[in-house]
Amino acid sequence: MSRLLVTGFGPFPTVPDNPSARLARRLAGSPHLRRVLGQAPDCLVLDTRYAALDAQLAPALAEGPSAVLMIGVAARRSRVCVETRAVNRVSRLFPDAGGAVGRTLAFEPESPAQRRSRAAAQVLVALRRAGLAAVASRDAGRYLCNASYFQALAADRPVVFLHVPMPPRTRRPTAGGGRRRPTLDRWAAAFVEAARVLALRSRAQR
Ligand code: PCA
């Protein structure tokens, strides 16, 4: 059966505890999302290694998910970013979790210079409507997030990549003295709406 695939990433040298893995698992286990989709999505937490693209992502994509919602952390950003494209470029500077760096500058030498997400604009609207001050980004970096997005965008199905900032470590008291809803909970709730958009688009494509 064709379904939504949700992906996150494990730790890497500058981010020992990657919130994207927790978010992906939370979404995949969300009863609300299960109701929205009519079934639970598949969840894949990728090792932050170049080797994981072939070893983990490729087989999951080969199973033919109807849509893919990808999540990664961008520690220096302050807002959730909807990535509008992935480029065919790899950093040779930043080692992955296994110490390997990209070997060639082009990720796939025979492939186009970039691939765009046709679902990104609609996902951005959905996230904002869900109360998240998300922004569009045309720069998914030159590391594993960009590379995985480039790979997932190769097939004709709705795919979007969401970069999240590092969530604050402590819960901040609100002006009224109460506690704000934890950041990860707010993101996960809004990401259900992103998943809804992807699912509707995939149904329309069939
Ligand atoms: N962020 C990195 C890789 C894994 C992750 O969560 C990136 O932005 O490429």
Image (spheres, rainbow, N blue to C red):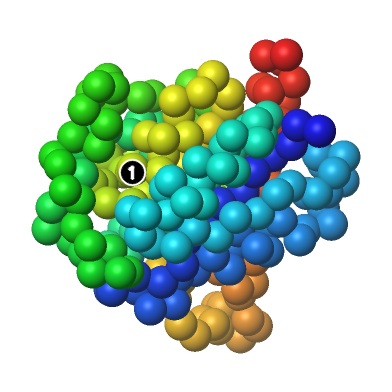
Q: Is residue 166 visible?
A: yes
Q: Amino acid at mark 1?
A: Asn
Label 1 crowding class (10 Å Cα cut-off): few <14, some 14-19, many 20+? many
Identify the residue at horizontal 56%, vertical 78% (top origin).
174
Q: Quadrant of the N terminus?
A: top right
Identify the residue at horizontal 28%, vertical 74% (top origin).
13
Q: Quadrant of the C terminus?
A: top right
Identify the residue at horizontal 69%, vertical 39% (top origin).
4
* Horizontal and vertical percent position of residue 25: 65, 63
* Horizontal and vertical percent position of residue 196: 71, 36
> In the picture provided, is 141 more to the left or to the right than 79?
left
Pick whichever, 138 or 15, lies toward us.
Answer: 15
Please tell me whether residue 6 is drawn above or below residue 76 in the rendered image.
above
* Residue identifier under label 1: 146
> In the picture provided, is 144 more to the left or to the right than 1?
left
Q: Is mark 1 within 8 Å of ligand 1?
A: yes
State the SS at label 1.
Answer: helix
* Horizontal and vertical percent position of residue 65: 66, 34
* Horizontal and vertical percent position of residue 58: 50, 41
